[in-house]
Amino acid sequence: MPRSRINIAESNDEQGVAVFEEDIKPKSRRSSAIVDSDSEDGDDDDDAVRMFSSQAPEMSQDIRPARDTEKSNLLNLGEEAREKVLTDLLRLCLFKALAGQPINRSDCAKEAGLTDSRISNAAFEEVNIRLRNIFDFELKRIPAWMERMKNIPNRFKDRYYAINVLEDDSDNGAHSKTIHSIHKSAAVEKGLLMVVLALTYCKGEPTNDGSRWILDKDLYHLLHKIDENIHPDPPVPGLKRNRGTENKDGGEGMTPDVDIVLARFVDMDYLIREKATKQLMDVCSNAEDTSFFFCMGPRAVMEIGRRQVIYFCAEILDEEPDPTMLAELEHTEGVEDVPMTA
């Protein structure tokens, strides 16, 4: 049984890294130089952890500001009614944040009893203050450059994301390690997320709006080359497939069920999955009417960032970050708004 090589960040599997290096060779418009790195020994060491540098996430936007009239309307509700609405909205936002779900502004307002749209912005503004002061979460909107993307669905423009703004007070990232290393399966899933984002961004077809889209069959083909336990083709609607395979040759965890995990990444907005459109088919000649495309989603951009993905790929390749790709970021970073505290 082939060994799972998905958990790159927690493995010293030289063969797995070599396959991944080959698969993230940049496409056209990017540097394609590869520098091979030699390991000091060829033995697997389950205690060895490959460390990566940390880059600041992308700049997001503040939530929609409340007008003075909206604040007055909220105050006019009366203390008891106002506190009930704010408490319900706060709990709803907090539960969605802990579940990794996006916060649909209009839907959450209605669910919390905010039937008057003239006070929703003021209510979210007050809830945002409480989230920050009590839980170190902060509601943010997607970056400005994403709002300008031609192929982004309108639903993302009405969503907020609860971002963890608690700063790590140690040099070794103890806080981040604690919250992200509770379960080994979660660590494997986050490793898969970085691999998928790297393949999507490095092998995806570039567009003029700063986004890159990869065909679903190309993504599955690349993942299969990294781990043979992963199906080489995307799922066919209505056809049930086997789950991931346990790793019986040593190492940690298992090959995850990529179909399910990718769907979860889409639900959490780490990825955008869209059916082929004329614009997307223009940038990918082998796409069909029934094809689907993947792109980095708002949550991945805000929590991880394109720059982090570029540096992640560069360190896997043991080379300097691609200057062409970094230069392309400046084209969109210039229109972004408020820096996000990591």
Image (spheres, helix red, strand yellow):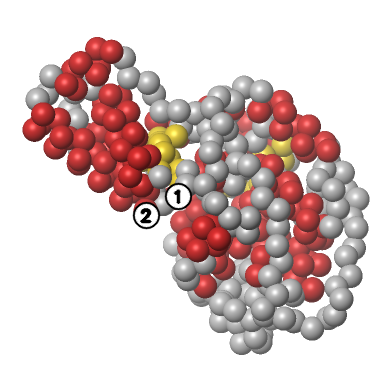
Q: Image point 66% across, 87% down: which residue?
A: 249
286 or 182, which lies in front?
182
Ranked by sequence position, the earlier of labels 2 and 1 is 2
Few, some or many C-alpha atoms within 10 Å of disc 2 (few <14, some 14-19, many ≥20)?
A: few
Residue 19 position in % (x across, y down)? 78, 66
In the shown orientation, is residue 104 left or right of residue 337? left
Q: Quadrant of residue 74?
A: top left
Q: Quadrant of residue 63?
A: top left
Secondary-structure class at tag 1:
loop
Q: Image point 67% across, 78% down: which residue?
A: 47
Instruction: Please state which amino acid type lies under the numbered disc 2.
Output: Ala
Q: Image point 26% across, 41% down: which residue?
A: 90
Instruction: Please state which amino acid type lies under the numbered disc 1.
Output: Met
Secondary-structure class at tag 2:
loop
Which residue bears the numbered disc 2?
A: 99
Q: Is residue 246 above or below residue 149?
A: below
Residue 156 position in % (x across, y down)? 45, 34
Which residue bears the numbered disc 1?
A: 268
36 or 263, which lies in front?
36
Residue 44 position in % (x across, y down)? 74, 81
235 or 87, which lies in front?
87
Task: Name the quarter where the N terminus is drawn.
Answer: bottom right
Q: Quadrant of residue 110?
A: top left
Residue 26 position in % (x across, y down)? 81, 48
Residue 275 appearing in the image: no
Task: Name the quarter where the C terminus is drawn.
Answer: top right
Q: Image point 29% across, 30% down: which residue?
A: 126
**Residue at the top extreme?**
69
